[in-house]
Amino acid sequence: NAAVSPQVGSHRDISLESLSLFRLLEPQIEILVLGTGDRVERLPPTMMKQMRECGIAVEVQDTANACATFNFLMNERRVVAAGLIPP
């Protein structure tokens, strides 16, 4: 488990560049849980598609639910990472 902090202040700052860090983790993560603050924000479909093509499923939720999902997946022993924007 690692905590990293790409410079993302809001969901509008999420880009393929900011997500590239998650593609470099070893072992490769299966699921990236993104918490977009107080509410769920849609990410561009092309960004989601490119992450899927790298073998990483992306789950976008409000941050409170993203934390719960991350903890659940960790308990299931999944290889997961979280990118969380404070609410």
Image (spheres, rainbow, N blue to C red):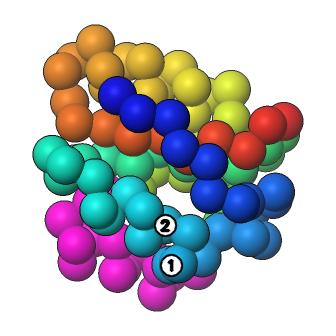
Q: Residue at x 22, y 36 (%)?
A: 79
As drawn, 68 above or below 81: above
Position of 68 with respect to 21 (left or right) is: right
Quadrant for the C terminus, please: top right
- Circle 1 Cα neighbour tier, 10 Å, few/some/many (<14 / 14–19 / ≥20): some
Which circle marks residue 78 in the picture?
none
Instruction: In the displayed orientation, state which residue is furthest to the top.
Output: 75
Image spot of residue 51 (x, y percent): 34, 71
Residue 24, picture quadrant = bottom left
- The N terminus, quarter of image: top left
Tell me where residue 69 appears, x and y as whole percent.
46, 27
According to the picture, the residue beneath numbered tag 2 turns out to be 19
Is-magenta flag for residue 21? Answer: no
Mark 1: secondary structure: helix
Q: What's under tag 2, amino acid-wise?
A: Leu
The front one of 11 and 4 is 4
Which structural element holds mark 2? helix
Magenta residue span: 43-57
The residue depicted at 31 percent of the width and 38 percent of the height is 80
Q: Position of residue 19 (x, y in %)?
A: 48, 66
Q: Nearer the viewer, residue 11 or 9?
A: 9
- Left or right of 23, for residue 40: right
Instruction: Tell me whether circle 2 and circle 1 mark residues in contact (CB < 8 Å).
Output: yes
Q: Is residue 52 magenta?
A: yes
Residue 35 pos. (x, y %): 63, 43
- Please, what is the dominant secondary structure of the magenta stretch? helix
45 lies left or right of 30: right
- Extreme residue toward the bottom, this view: 46
Say few, some or many: other residues with alpha carbon within 10 Å of mark 2 (under 14 / 14 to 19 / 20 or more).
Answer: some
Q: CA distance from mark 2 to mark 1?
A: 5 Å
Give amino acid for label 1.
Answer: Leu
Q: Which mark is residue 16?
A: 1
